[in-house]
Image (cartoon, coloured by chain):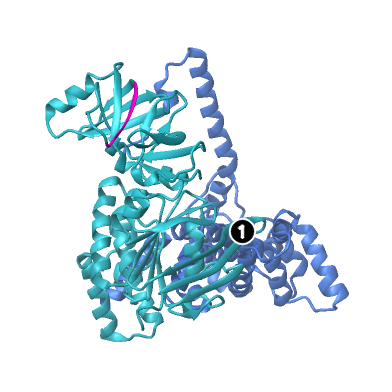
């Protein structure tokens, strides 16, 4: 298979349920070996996309290709993709080994070859010792691994994962994220992963498609999505964001954003071309924002005055909420040393400044 | 398992409500007596020495039981009932299970109306079904009344139960198991055979057992549709026309014991079925 042939390709794919449009003219190409993440709030069309690829729901219009072959009308059992379902959908009347063997038997694999491959994949997910158990005798995390082994044992061109970690508790989820990334590196299958959890997407994916209302709002690597959100929706959905709105104009040391209060906030030099006088919004991540009684001297800082109305100690960091002329700005500060936590705590109800390096400001479209 | 705490019991109550509560307890005993005392006497009299059952109890005997096998008319009726029950159970389970699928999974118009229409015979008086069958089978189609007409009558009564039981199981069936099987390469027929049928098997088995029990005791519809070969309930009826005999008491006791055993089996299948089924599967696999 040539490398430029995508594992999955959607071309102007649309899915309607009655009058509701679940997927609205979406096109995407997923390269072989990617860990591709469909991320978005519920109802954004991400699970519909997965079900389309799996073959469980038909496309209304457009085209779906798997490894270059058009498969719009191919039933699920004839597609070279396998799915890990949200509730795992393990067969309750079959042992772990039988569950994993099921797909091989369907392919006509016989005898010792079945056993060998079942053992190989149960080993991969670390469950070889439990092969004779029934699914309900396993914990949620173990069932999850069985579902993974059952789907992977067929060596599909693409593995589809529908919120597979949603039912696990936080600690197990973190563990499985690492595990999934390891398995992906080991088997080199294309993974298409659906989640509403941005942390999951950022930590595992090679590429993310942020979906909203049946469309792709932005597609890119985790870092691109996080640091250069295309619009306000993406910025809001991925991580936490501060938004500062104002009118761009030319200051003495470069471009500035003039707030309603008349305060002037420095903008990155590269944004000098912004149309003067028109409303613009700047986004900055809370961890890029610092807070204190006086801002550091010198150029290169965007500074706003305000009043600290909330200080929350979170253990590894402190979040300070400051009311400014541009609305609330949140600064999230790590504690390199203990005294820092106390210093931040003393800011409550004080007149303070928030500041960040102008390089961290991102001018975004209103979404 | 620890006994669940009774909230009412732990709450302090007035003397009056305590008295009311005791009165209700006593009343429930009266209701139970009303339900079971006649049956207790039936069982008791099946062991009564005297030819004419009644109080006082004159002596204990097993004669009525030991002489049953010599009564060829009775044995014929029992055999006939069993044959009918098995055929009824087989046909009702097959057709009823097939009918349950479209009712639950849609694909038919007016599913609710269809469900009511399918299960209506349970609500209809048996005498109405009996008369209807005679008018239709004997009067309209001019069919001789025989075992076959009895089977037809029993199917009308048992099929709705099969549909109800299997539909209830299908209702709770996770369709994603079928998606998963299809996803792993199973065609529609394989999905039914390997996934759906094994998982609804306890319901199908329970439905078959209920069909057998219903068919064996059915009187009203049988009375209208029966030909020259009597079933057990019809035989018992012909016997008590001439007064209650100890043989009838003995037969009735045996039927009751059989019914209780069948119901026990149904309950076991319905509640433990999946677990027991798996234990069997494990044993078979272990022995392979």
* Colour of chain A as rendered: cyan
Q: Is residue A295 placed above or below A62 in the rendered structure?
A: above
Left or right of A50, for residue A191: left
Left or right of A216, for residue A153: left
Question: For the magenta stretch, what is the residue range?
Answer: A300-306
Residue A221: say if magenta.
Answer: no
Quarter of the rendering containing residue A14: bottom right
Q: Quadrant of the N terminus of chain A?
A: bottom left
SS majority, magenta: strand
Q: Is residue B41 placed above or below B89 in the rendered structure?
A: above
Residue A344 percent location from the top left of the image:
22, 24
Residue A305: say if magenta.
Answer: yes
Quarter of the rendering containing residue A308: top left
Q: Is residue B71 placed above or below B10 in the rendered structure?
A: below
**Could you say which is closer to the camera, residue B46 or residue B2?**
B2
Residue at 30%, 47% in the rendered image: A169
Left or right of A199, for residue B72: right
Residue at 44%, 72% in the rendered image: A8
| Residue placed furthest toward the top | B15
Residue at 45%, 37% in the rendered image: A248
Residue B156 percent location from the top left of the image:
71, 66
Residue A13 percent location from the top left of the image:
55, 67
**Could you say which is closer to the camera, residue B159 or residue A333?**
A333
Residue bearing mark 1: B164
**According to the colouring, which chain is blue?**
B
Residue at 47%, 26% in the rendered image: A260
**Could you say which is closer to the camera, residue A261 or residue A364?**
A261
* Residue A167 makes an appearance in the image: no
């Amino acid at each position: 298979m040539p490398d430029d042939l995508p594992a999955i390709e959607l071309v102007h794919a649309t899915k309607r349920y009655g009058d509701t449009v679940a997927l609205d003219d979406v096109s995407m190409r997923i390269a072989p070996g990617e860990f591709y993440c469909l991320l978005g709030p519920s109802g954004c069309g991400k699970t519909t996309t997965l079900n389309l690829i799996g073959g469980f729901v038909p496309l209304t219009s457009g085209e779906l290709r798997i490894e270059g072959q058009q498969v719009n009308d191919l039933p699920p059992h004839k597609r070279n993709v396998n799915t890990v379902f949200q509730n795992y959908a393990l067969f309750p009347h079959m042992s772990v080994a039988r569950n994993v063997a099921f797909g091989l038997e369907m392919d006509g694999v016989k005898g010792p070859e079945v056993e060998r491959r079942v053992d190989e994949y149960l080993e991969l997910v670390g469950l070889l010792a439990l092969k004779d158990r029934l699914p309900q005798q396993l914990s949620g995390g173990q069932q999850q691994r069985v579902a993974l082994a059952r789907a992977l044992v067929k060596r599909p061109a693409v593995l589809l994962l529908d919120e597979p970690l949603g039912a696990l508790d936080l600690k197990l989820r973190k563990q499985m994220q690492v595990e999934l990334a390891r398995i992906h590196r080991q088997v080199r299958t294309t993974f298409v992963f659906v989640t509403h959890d941005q942390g999951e997407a950022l930590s595992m994916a090679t590429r993310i498609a942020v979906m909203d209302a049946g469309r792709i709002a932005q597609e890119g690597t985790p870092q691109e999505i996080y640091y250069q959100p295309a619009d306000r929706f993406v910025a809001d959905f991925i991580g936490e964001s501060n938004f500062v709105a104002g009118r761009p104009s030319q200051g003495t040391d470069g471009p500035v954003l003039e707030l309603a209060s008349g305060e002037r906030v420095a903008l990155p030099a590269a944004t000098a071309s912004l149309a003067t006088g028109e409303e613009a919004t700047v986004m900055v991540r809370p961890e890029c924002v610092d807070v204190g009684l006086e801002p550091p001297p010198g150029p290169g800082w965007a500074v706003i005055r305000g009043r600290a109305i909330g200080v929350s100690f979170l253990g590894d960091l402190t979040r300070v909420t400051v009311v400014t002329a541009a609305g609330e700005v949140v600064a999230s500060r790590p504690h390199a040393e203990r005294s820092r936590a106390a210093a931040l705590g003393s800011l409550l109800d004080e007149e303070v400044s928030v500041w960040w390096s102008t390089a961290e400001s991102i001018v975004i479209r209103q979404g | 398992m620890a006994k669940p705490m009774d909230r009412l019991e732990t709450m302090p109550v007035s003397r009056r409500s305590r008295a009311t509560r005791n009165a209700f307890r006593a009343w429930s005993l009266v209701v139970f007596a009303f339900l079971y005392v006649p049956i207790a006497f039936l069982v008791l009299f099946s062991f009564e020495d005297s030819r004419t059952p009644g109080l006082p109890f004159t002596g204990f005997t097993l004669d009525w039981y030991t002489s049953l096998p010599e009564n060829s008319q009775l044995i014929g009726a029992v055999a006939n009932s069993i044959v009918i029950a098995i055929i009824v159970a087989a046909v009702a389970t097959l057709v009823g299970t097939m009918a349950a699928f479209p009712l639950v999974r849609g694909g038919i118009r007016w599913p609710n109306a269809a469900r009511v229409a399918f299960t209506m015979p349970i609500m209809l008086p048996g005498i109405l079904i009996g008369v209807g069958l005679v008018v239709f089978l004997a009067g309209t189609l001019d069919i001789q009344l025989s075992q076959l007409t009895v089977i037809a009558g029993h199917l009308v009564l048992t099929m709705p139960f099969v549909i109800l039981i299997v539909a209830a199981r299908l209702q709770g069936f996770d369709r994603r198991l079928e998606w998963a099987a299809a996803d792993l390469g199973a065609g529609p027929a394989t999905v039914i055979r390997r996934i759906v049928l094994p998982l609804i098997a306890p319901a199908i088995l329970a439905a078959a057992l209920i069909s057998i029990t219903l068919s064996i005791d059915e009187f009203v519809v049988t009375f209208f549709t029966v030909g020259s070969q009597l079933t057990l309930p019809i035989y018992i009826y012909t016997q008590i026309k001439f007064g209650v005999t100890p043989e009838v008491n003995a037969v009735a006791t045996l039927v009751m014991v059989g019914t209780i055993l069948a119901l026990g089996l149904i309950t076991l299948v319905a509640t433990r079925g999946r677990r027991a089924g798996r234990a069997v599967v494990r044993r078979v696999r272990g022995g392979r």
